Amino acid sequence: MAPFIEAVIDRAALPSGGAILDVACGTGFLTRRAGEVAGAGARVAGLDVNAGMLARARASQASAPGVRFEWHEASVLDMPFGDGEFDAVLSQQGVQFFPSLERAAAEMHRVLRPGGRVVATFWSDLSEQTFFRVQNESLDRVIGQNMGEAFALDPEQARACFAQAGFRDIELRPSATKKPAAKRPTTRAGR
């Protein structure tokens, strides 16, 4: 995931010493990297609904001196932050799992400062990804379940949700690591 984390960081253009929120932060890989990039004086918050993921995130050593890391167990649909608290909101591989992307986008817009930026990533359709398509078919054949929902978010649906929430300058851009099979759209929205 490291190349994708760097792609998110590059697109976000994080402000030095800024306030950054990582929603659906999981074990905090992106959260910690955002802190390293934002540097001393930054406030970097990770938010996730999974207590186990957050426990792992808290236990991982952050290598960003002078950065204040926070970990919040809460839903992106009802975030425990005030209006306009963050310069940037990030989400790596979370948006496709939100119970309501419309409500999540509205919450991201609410907590973002005017002029702030959201960068969210999600996998492309399985038809575009040989590696994951074969893996998914094998899972289905062997255990009768697959991970198809992780690849089900339509980029235009994501655009519409962010536009409805009040974002403008919405840009959808397919990204890839050096291995072409690992593509995913990146959604960037400015407030």
Image (tube, helix red, strand yellow):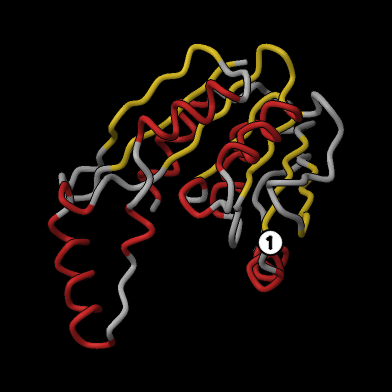
Q: Residue at x 18, y 83 (%)?
A: 141
Give percent across and percent down for residue 11. Answer: 45, 26
Q: Residue at x 66, y 12 (%)?
A: 115
Res. 173 image quadrant: top left
Judge whether 72 appears above or below 146 on screen.
above
Q: Residue at x 63, y 46 (%)?
A: 23
Of the pair 35 and 144, the residue shown nearer to us: 144
What type is the residue that disc 1 sits on?
A: Val
Q: How many marks?
A: 1
- Quarter of the image that includes the C terminus: top right
Q: Residue at x 62, y 47 (%)?
A: 31
In the image, taking residue 15 as reference, residue 110 lies left or right, namely right
Of the pair 74 and 77, the residue shown nearer to us: 77
In the image, taking residue 51 as reference, residue 80 lies left or right, namely right
Residue highlighted by disc 1: 49
Judge whether 171 appears above or below 32 on screen.
above
Of the pair 147 and 57, the residue shown nearer to us: 147
Res. 42 image quadrant: top right
Give percent across and percent down for residue 140. Answer: 23, 78
Question: Circle 1 sits in a helix, a strand or a loop, which is it?
Answer: loop
Q: Residues within 10 Å of mark 1 (few under 14, many from 20)?
A: some
Give percent across and percent down for residue 32. Answer: 62, 48
Q: Given the current orientation, which residue lies at the most extreme bottom position?
A: 142
Give percent across and percent down for residue 12. Answer: 52, 26
Judge whether 180 appears above or below 171 on screen.
below
